[in-house]
């Protein structure tokens, strides 16, 4: 904050960039009441992945009012809003808009009471527990600024409101529906996510891998069932599945290069119905995480090999080998290209002050923003974080994130005002820099 004051003081005397910066802050401050009204409305009315209807309709109408050329229903429920403004690069700005099957416990006055339907038909409470409502509000805030500042940039902006991020389906659905062929193809890809690991208003820009490859692996372990008193007549799938779980621990500890991050977690183990029955199958479900394609292959191949090897060691015949299934869609790691992410980090540091900008380590969650860059790796791409932990809570926990609610928690209540105003300002200065007049 101190640095900001110094910048503001300097602006009054000479430097025009800082004067422009404070003009931008003022304009965003004036927009905030409307953006917060939108945020609270979205928060109270969350929509599950690939079922977004109200959110895109509302935002499409707003974007038309700003003069964007708007196309709805791209990739089922996505929105693409294009503004062409002379020669220059094409910049894609993406916000995801889906919520989660979580029962909100924040106690906020505008907390969600919405009940939704999962793809299997079952009912679930729905909550914006990942903060995508702050992303949507920022998306509109950025569009509003860029439309108002048209005389200060040159190029094309492609604003993308993406469905189904939580199921890592929406980006692919939009690409399959012609995002890069029906609309101007982007040279730069930009997105942000609110963060439960940074204090409100702090920006984190990773370089290189930002988020991980995530695979869900199901192992269906077979056995020969029978009476619990006669194990010699059976091949016990619970014992076999237990051995598989233990052997899987050596994949990361003994086979993987310790300098390459990797996670193999068995999150679910289901077998049997009664104490004196040896069942004929056991089911394991794993989450497998990595950054590089090589580590990903090592883990997935290793899981198949260990499952089969342990089954052979247990004396199971060929037709009772475990079935290993990798669930689709899986998520590919999100990569921040090096010149672009570094340029943004220094741009944000000079705009907001170095004390508000960090270079965080990658995290092992996933994002399907990755797909836009993977569809054409010659382009520049960055996703950055904007801290959402309210300052009082951050200080009370002394910055120990283990004491704070994470994303997807029913208690996640970001300082939305700080997230939306900071992210809108960051997105706008990034856009003005990329689309600088020649
Ligand atoms: Zn999420
Ligand atoms: Zn998210």
Image (cartoon, rainbow, N blue to C red):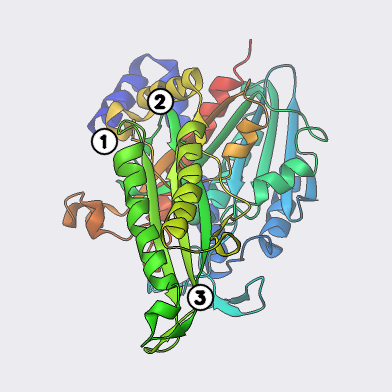
Q: Nearer the viewer, residue 138 or 358?
A: 358
**Which percent across, then down, holds residue 286?**
45, 58
Q: Which residue is mark 1?
A: 1
- Residue at point 51% right, 50% down? 304
Residues marked 2 and 3 touching at CB (< 8 Å):
no
Secondary element under disc 1, as helix, strand or loop, is: loop
Dot 3 surroundings within 10 Å: few (below 14), some, or many (20 or more)?
A: some
- Of label 1 and label 3, which has the lower sequence position? 1
- Of label 2 and label 1, which has the lower sequence position? 1
How many angstroms separate mark 1 from mark 3 (CA)? Answer: 67 Å
**Which percent across, then down, holds residue 313?**
41, 57
- Residue at point 70% right, 56% down? 56
State which quadrant residue 108 falls in.
bottom left
Is 224 situated left or right of 379 in this image?
A: left
Quadrant the N terminus occupies: top left
Q: Which residue is mark 2?
A: 345
State which quadrant residue 347 falls in.
top left
Q: Nearer the viewer, residue 394 or 185?
A: 185
How many angstroms separate mark 2 from mark 3 (CA)? Answer: 59 Å
Is 113 situated left or right of 392 in this image?
A: right
Secondary element under disc 2, as helix, strand or loop, is: helix
The label nearer to you, 1 versus 3, is 3
- Residue at point 21% right, 49% down? 399
Q: Which residue is mark 3?
A: 224
Residues marked 1 and 3 touching at CB (< 8 Å):
no
Secondary element under disc 3, as helix, strand or loop, is: loop
The label nearer to you, 2 versus 3, is 3
Dot 2 surroundings within 10 Å: few (below 14), some, or many (20 or more)?
A: many
């Amino acid at each position: 904050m101190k640095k900001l004051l110094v910048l503001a003081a300097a602006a009054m005397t000479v430097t025009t960039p800082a004067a422009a910066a404070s003009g931008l802050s003022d304009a965003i401050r004036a927009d905030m009441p409307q953006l917060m009204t939108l945020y609270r409305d979205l928060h109270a009315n969350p929509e599950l992945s690939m079922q977004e209807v109200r959110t895109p309709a509302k935002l499409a109408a707003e974007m038309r009012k700003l003069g964007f050329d708007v196309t709805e229903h791209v990739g089922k429920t996505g929105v693409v809003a294009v503004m062409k403004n002379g020669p220059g690069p094409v910049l894609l700005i993406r916000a995801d808009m889906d919520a989660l099957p979580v029962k909100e416990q924040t106690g906020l006055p505008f907390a969600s009471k919405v009940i939704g339907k999962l793809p299997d038909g079952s009912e679930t409470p729905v909550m914006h527990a990942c903060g995508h409502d702050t992303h949507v509000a920022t998306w509109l805030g950025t569009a509003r600024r860029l439309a108002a500042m048209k005389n200060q940039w040159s190029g094309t902006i492609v604003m993308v409101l993406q469905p189904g991020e939580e199921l890592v389906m929406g980006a692919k659905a939009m690409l399959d529906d012609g995002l890069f062929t029906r609309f101007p193809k982007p040279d730069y890809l930009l997105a942000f996510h609110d963060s439960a690991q940074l204090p409100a208003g702090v920006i984190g820009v990773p370089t290189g891998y930002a988020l991980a490859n995530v695979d869900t692996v199901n192992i269906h372990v077979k056995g020969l069932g029978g009476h619990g008193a006669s194990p010699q007549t059976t091949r016990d799938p619970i014992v076999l599945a237990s051995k598989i779980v233990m052997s899987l621990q050596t994949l990361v500890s003994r086979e993987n290069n310790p300098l390459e991050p990797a996670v193999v977690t068995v999150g679910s183990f289901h077998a049997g119905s009664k104490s004196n029955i040896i069942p004929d199958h056991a089911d394991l479900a794993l989450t497998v995480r990595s950054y590089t394609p090589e580590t990903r292959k090592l883990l997935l191949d290793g899981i198949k090999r260990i499952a089969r090897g342990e089954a052979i060691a247990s004396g199971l015949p060929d037709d009772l080998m475990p079935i290993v299934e990798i669930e689709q869609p899986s998520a590919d790691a999100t990569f921040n290209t090096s010149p672009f992410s570094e340029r943004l980090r220094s741009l944000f540091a000079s705009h907001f002050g170095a004390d508000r900008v960090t270079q965080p380590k990658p995290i092992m969650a996933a994002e399907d923003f990755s797909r836009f860059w993977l569809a054409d790796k010659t382009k520049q791409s960055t996703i950055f974080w904007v801290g959402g932990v309210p300052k009082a809570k951050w200080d009370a926990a002394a910055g120990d994130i283990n004491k704070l609610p994470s994303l997807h928690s029913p208690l996640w209540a970001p300082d939305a005002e700080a997230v939306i105003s900071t992210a809108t300002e960051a997105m706008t200065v990034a856009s003005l820099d990329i689309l600088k007049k020649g």
